[in-house]
């Protein structure tokens, strides 16, 4: 939504530093997800790890040029009333029937878009298109990480309703930049997710549960430490007002590992989804794709084959309609 960009500009913060996990955290999360993949997948992803890392932020870059992009990064679930997090239909069709597609898009669609991206990734594996596999993997990683940010699940996304403007970038950019070098990012191996849509909602649910803590703890801290809340730092040629290191450390401590937990959850779920899409596409041989540069014609033929195959599948299993 444009509103978020406008808020950032009004606050004098670059839109690229405001309103989403900082570039730094997104890139670190995508990069680390590569290392939880099984041996059959890791070679292909490691060969392309620089792309997976850098492209982690492409969806945010697109937000300002594509009107469809912004709602994919969040869901203002509290717009729908008390306990909406439990009542919102999990599947797009049911939710759209209840609230209309326009309303859903106006207040954010991140859990559904994760599911859409999973299906796109599965298709890319079925087609065997290395470029699409990498692009969709990187971007799916972005949306999964966004779904783990508590302030991506509330209308009060930048503390603007409670006099805490700036808390969004504070939580998701400043804290990881200052403290994530000390985090434990060992999250085990990727595992298969049985229901991607439900799993995406579970991520949103647990992020949303943390919203009150994110806001209330900062409010309390601000009452006690207001004198040392801000400091000035020089970045490049600019001197900018930032939350001070002392204040950031105090906030980080009272959050009791929350940022670390949400980063770990993001890494695990991203690896799980890449793995799940690959397994569900029949575990294609990715080693063959490392140096493979298909022509447009080859890809077109493969896409048609996959579409024809999918139609056959739908005919024989007409009850499966969760997409
Ligand atoms: Zn984002």
Image (tube, helix red, strand yellow):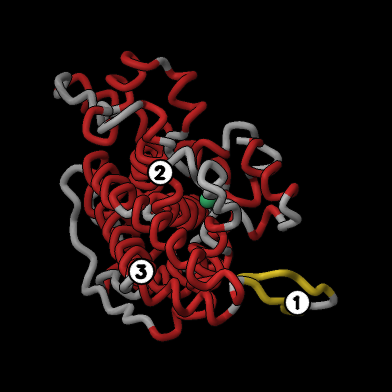
x 19%, y 42%: residue: 195
Query: Hey, which quadrant is residue 287 in on the image?
Result: bottom left
Is 174 in front, or is 307?
A: 174
Secondary element at tag 2: helix
User: Residue 255 — which label?
Assistant: 3
For residue 116, above or below residue 269: above
Residue 26 appears in the rendering: no
Secondary structure of the residue carrying numbered label 1: strand
Query: Split into 4 quadrants, where in the image is the N terminus?
Result: top right
Residue 133 horizontal/vertical position (percent):
44, 53
Label number found at residue 153: 2
Under circle 3, the secondary element is loop
Q: Residues within 10 Å of mark 3 (few under 14, many from 20)?
A: some
Label at residue 235: 1
| Sequence-earlier tag: 3 or 2 | 2
* Residue 220 left/right relative to 323: right
């Amino acid at each position: 939504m444009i509103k978020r960009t406008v808020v950032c500009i009004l606050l004098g913060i670059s839109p690229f530093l405001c309103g989403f996990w900082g570039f730094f955290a997104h890139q670190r999360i995508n990069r680390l997800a590569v290392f939880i993949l099984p041996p059959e997948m890791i070679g292909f992803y490691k060969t392309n790890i620089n792309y997976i890392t850098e492209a982690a932020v492409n969806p945010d870059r697109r937000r300002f040029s594509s009107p469809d992009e912004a709602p994919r990064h969040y869901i203002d679930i509290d717009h729908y009333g008390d306990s909406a997090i439990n009542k919102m239909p999990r599947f797009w069709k049911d939710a759209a029937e209840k609230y209309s597609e326009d309303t859903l898009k106006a207040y954010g669609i991140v859990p559904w878009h994760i599911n859409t991206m999973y299906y796109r990734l599965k298709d890319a594996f079925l087609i065997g298109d290395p470029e699409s596999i990498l692009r969709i993997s990187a971007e799916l990683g972005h949306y999964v990480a966004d779904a783990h940010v508590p302030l991506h699940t509330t209308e009060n996304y930048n503390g603007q309703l409670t006099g805490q403007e700036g808390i969004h970038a504070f939580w998701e950019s400043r804290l990881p930049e200052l403290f994530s070098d000390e985090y434990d990012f060992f999250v085990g191996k990727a595992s298969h997710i049985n229901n991607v849509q439900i799993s995406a909602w579970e991520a949103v649910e647990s992020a949303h549960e943390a919203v009150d803590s994110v806001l209330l703890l900062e409010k309390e801290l601000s009452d006690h430490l207001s004198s040392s809340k801000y400091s000035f730092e020089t970045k490049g040629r600019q001197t900018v007002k930032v939350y001070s290191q002392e204040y950031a450390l105090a906030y980080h401590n009272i959050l009791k590992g929350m940022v670390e937990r949400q980063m770990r959850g993001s890494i695990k779920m991203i690896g799980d989804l890449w793995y799940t899409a690959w397994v569900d596409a029949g575990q294609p041989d990715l080693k063959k794709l490392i140096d493979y540069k298909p022509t447009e014609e080859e890809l077109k033929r493969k896409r048609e084959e996959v579409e024809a195959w999918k139609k056959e599948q739908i005919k024989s299993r007409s009850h499966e309609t969760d997409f």
